[in-house]
Image (tube, rainbow, N blue to C red):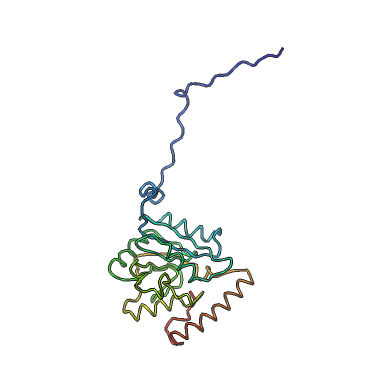
Amino acid sequence: MCTVPTSVVAPAPSALPAPPAAPRRDAAARSLDRHPPGTPPEVTIVIPTLDAAGDRLRRCVRAIQDHTDAPYEVVVVDNGAPPQGFTAPVNAGLRAARGRYAVVCNDDVEVRPGWWPPLRTALDAGHPVAFPWTLDGPMREDFAAWCFAVSRDALDRHAVAPGEFLDPGLVVWYQDTDLLTRLRAAATPPVLVRESHVRHGLSETVATDDPTLRAWIDRQVEDDRTAFEARHGSQVPGAFVAG
């Protein structure tokens, strides 16, 4: 025979202390409350990256989550294995975009509060491409392509071929200046929107310690230079400024 310990009965639920209140979230963190699942995105943000699991991309996406009030979707395209350069993943992401507007954003960019409405206003005013002011770093005022917004109409009107907004013949470099040259020829150059702010880690997107990948990038930059000069000559202003 064994002895059964005395049973212990827990207090009734009404006698239990109330659970702690859930922490309050700021307006940006409540974006899913304001825009429930199924809400069509206003803007699609396309981010090409060499490292979809890296901290740089995490910071980029977190800034978008914290500072974007409109309904949005993020399309991340991992182009690191095998490397595809910049143009192919951007074009693929733009083809997948569902928003009325699209933003192409390097993974070393962090948007700042209030970044999106001024860009949207510029697009609604008829500018096909608009780009924000870059804080605390080098800034190209003709076209800083590490972050730019484009209207849905412009994706079709200024594409080099159906579904190819950037020229696929320019794989890693010069596709931004090629687009700038095409937009200038159409008398609709990109517009700088100084009221919209981002931070940018200059050239971090193509930085790599992998010697094989580094060699591939270097070879491709030279191939892109040759292709660009064949299209536009060697005297295009700003063509050879690293970005």
Where is residue 121 drawn, in percent x and y?
30, 64
Along the line of sight, which residue is nearer the eye, 178 or 6? 178
Residue found at the far left of this picture: 125
Of all residues shown, which one is farthest toward the right?
1
Q: How many marks?
A: 0
Task: Give the x, y percent position of residue 208.
Answer: 59, 69
Residue that sits furthest to the front in the current view: 162
Residue at (53%, 21%) from the top-left corner? 10
Q: Residue at x 31, y 71 (%)?
A: 127
Relative side of 198 to 171, left or right: left
Q: In this view, does 115 lie above or below 225?
A: above
Q: Nearer the viewer, residue 43 or 155?
A: 155
Q: Where is residue 165 in the image (x, y as percent from the top left)?
A: 41, 72
Left-right relation of 91 to 204: left
Q: In this view, does 154 lie to the left or right of 83?
A: left
Question: Up-down: is 68 above or below 94?
Answer: above
Identified at 35% across, 80% down, the residue is: 184
Compared with 64, 19 (above or below) is above
Quadrant of image for the N terminus: top right
Q: In which quarter of the image is residue 21?
A: top left
Quadrant of residue 42 within the rendered picture? bottom left
Give the percent coordinates (x, y) of residue 220: 55, 77
Image quadrant in which you'd find residue 185: bottom left
Viewer-side residue, 84 vs 114: 84
Who is closer to the viewer here, 29 or 93?
Answer: 93
